[in-house]
Image (cartoon, grey):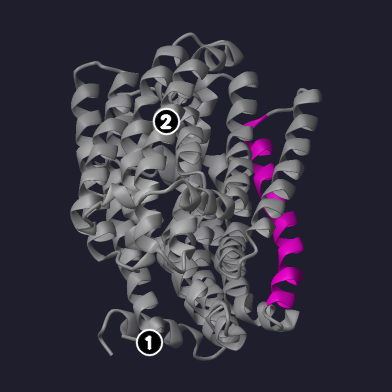
């Protein structure tokens, strides 16, 4: 099988698996959001930072180093099988030690026991990092993404729902993390079918893995800090309920990015790595990836930007309404992010991970400065914080584009050509959906009956479906008008990678 087809198939399976995972996760999120308060989700949002930081420390860039490794792979894998769990254990202990500091910073006593207990997830998760790297290196996502991920989401979601019904409160969400993580680790190793030979491990190989992973670790550290600047600012200034609303908006906003960029990135990095010495081939693959990511992500961005508030209220309940406007503003963050992430995979694949770190540092500096100004002026609100995400990622993208142009020896006009159909089509789509939803329909979430017949949330859901259908139709027509054949090419690529051509 050709590399292009293997990459495409891996991306397709990763996409299918993500949709299944997201569908299951979203369903249980709706259920638990109606069983638990925004304050409970806020406590979890303040505490879960220990998992993010700990996973980063446990991995230390080892996954990327294993994928990029050219020789002595067995030695590297077995070295990592020792080093990663050890650092995972250290990260878990560090999380327990940091729990009192988090509780003090947020002035929220319940954060202490929750964060301390969540730290144990780090040690469990560390056992699955190497097996995931092996699967990713081999572009083997079929069962991992399409079966294990949705299954883990179902096990975790069911655990949280049962415990929430029993009145466990925030502990139902803690149990969800353990159930989800254990299922993923066991499933990953069952699929890998790798027989460890720990006697092959050696200190020199660990140093080599650590050397490559250092820049990746630095970049991920800055990205992690970037990702929690907003939570820290909101938690300190607005309280746990606001963290819950903001977290709900973030989970919904990230869908278009994860459904395309992060999923594709899992295949793009190993594929780009194999093409790194062939610049014309790498250039063609990168431009094609950016084009298809834009065509897939932008219509979702447009739809969520318009129907965000009724979408949140109808599904989660009136108590979650403040998340709606923040969700709409977050689309300004996801749009440049969906174009920035493929560039990060490109830089790693050509052996320049330092660029990833530098660009992550730039995002952090812009966002940190912006939030610092809001904090100093006592002007912190959910919408203003969300707007800062778009500002910081947009600045990073503006700096990244010329670097990509030089790395691939391609003019800026070709990069613009790759995203032009999707960007113009998204703007037209937003305009059409806004006119229908705001001018014609009014407040969608308030339309719950027809002629005295109460339909509950069914009618608002149907109206949102109609708005979304109009938006997608406008997107397809406009994109084809701007560049004839671009949608047909996307469909043809989908048939190719799924074996239907």
Image height check: is 344 above or below 319? below
Foreground of the two, 112 or 221: 221
Foreground of the two, 3 or 372: 3
Image height check: is 429 above or below 491? above
Whether residue 393 sits left or right of residue 442 in the image: it is right
Picture quadrant of residue 242: top right
Element at badge 1?
helix
Residue 99 x, y percent position in the rendering: 49, 16
Residue that appears at 36% across and 42% down? 82
Image height check: is 93 above or below 59? above
Q: Is residue 17 visible?
A: yes
Residue range corresponding to the magenta coloring = 381-407
Mark 2, residue position: 318
Image height check: is 219 above or below 136? above
Residue 126 x, y percent position in the rendering: 36, 39
Q: Is residue 321 visible?
A: no
Q: Residues within 10 Å of mark 2 (few under 14, many from 20)?
A: few
Picture quadrant of residue 145: bottom left
Element at badge 2?
helix
Whether residue 389 sits left or right of residue 271 in the image: it is right
Residue that appears at 33% across and 23% down? 36
Q: Residues at badges 1 and 2 in contact (C-beta under 8 Å)?
A: no
Foreground of the two, 253 or 141: 141
Mark 1, residue position: 492
């Amino acid at each position: 099988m050709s590399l292009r087809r293997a990459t495409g198939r891996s991306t397709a399976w990763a996409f299918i698996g993500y949709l299944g995972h997201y569908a299951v996760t979203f369903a249980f999120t709706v259920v638990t959001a109606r069983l638990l308060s925004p304050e409970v989700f806020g406590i979890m949002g303040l505490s879960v930072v220990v998992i993010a930081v700990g996973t980063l420390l446990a991995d230390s860039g080892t996954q990327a180093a294993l994928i990029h490794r050219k020789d002595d792979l067995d030695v590297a894998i077995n070295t990592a099988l020792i080093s990663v769990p050890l650092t995972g254990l250290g990260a878990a202990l560090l999380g327990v030690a940091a729990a009192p500091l988090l509780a003090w910073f947020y002035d929220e006593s319940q954060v202490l026991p929750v964060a301390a207990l969540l730290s144990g997830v780090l040690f469990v998760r560390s056992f699955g990092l190497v097996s995931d790297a092996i699967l990713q290196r081999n572009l083997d996502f079929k069962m991992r993404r399409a079966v294990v991920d949705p299954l883990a989401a179902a096990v975790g979601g069911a655990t949280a729902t049962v415990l929430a019904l029993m009145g466990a409160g925030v502990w139902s969400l803690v149990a969800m993390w353990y159930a989800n993580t254990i299922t993923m680790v066991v499933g990953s190793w069952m699929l890998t079918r790798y027989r460890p030979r720990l006697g092959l491990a050696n200190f020199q190989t660990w140093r080599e893995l650590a050397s490559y992973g250092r820049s990746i670790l630095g970049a991920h550290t800055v990205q992690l800090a970037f990702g929690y600047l907003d939570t820290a600012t909101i938690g300190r200034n607005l309280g746990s309920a606001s963290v819950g609303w903001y977290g709900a908006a973030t989970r919904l906003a990230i869908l278009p990015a994860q459904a395309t960029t992060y999923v594709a990135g899992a295949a793009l990095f190993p594929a780009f790595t194999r093409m790194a010495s062939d610049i014309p081939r790498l250039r063609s693959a990168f431009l094609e990836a950016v084009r298809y990511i834009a065509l897939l992500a932008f219509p979702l961005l447009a739809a969520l930007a318009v129907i965000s508030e009724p979408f949140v209220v109808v599904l989660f309940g009136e108590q979650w309404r403040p998340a709606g406007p923040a969700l709409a503003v977050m689309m300004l963050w996801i749009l440049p992010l969906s174009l920035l992430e493929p560039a990060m995979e490109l830089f790693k694949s050509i052996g320049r991970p330092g660029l990833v770190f530098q660009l992550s540092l730039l995002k952090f500096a812009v966002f940190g400065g912006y939030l610092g100004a809001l904090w100093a002026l006592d002007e912190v609100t959910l919408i203003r914080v969300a707007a800062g995400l778009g500002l910081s990622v947009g600045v990073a993208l503006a700096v990244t584009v010329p670097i990509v142009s030089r790395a691939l020896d391609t003019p800026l006009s070709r990069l613009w050509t790759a995203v032009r159909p999707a960007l113009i089509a998204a703007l037209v789509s937003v305009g059409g959906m806004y006119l229908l939803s705001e001018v014609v329909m009014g407040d969608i979430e308030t339309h719950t009956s027809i002629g005295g017949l109460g339909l509950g949330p069914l009618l608002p859901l149907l109206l949102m479906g109609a708005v979304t259908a109009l938006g997608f139709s406008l997107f397809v027509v406009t994109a084809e008008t701007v560049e004839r054949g671009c949608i047909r090419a996307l469909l043809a690529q989908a048939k190719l990678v799924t074996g239907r051509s």
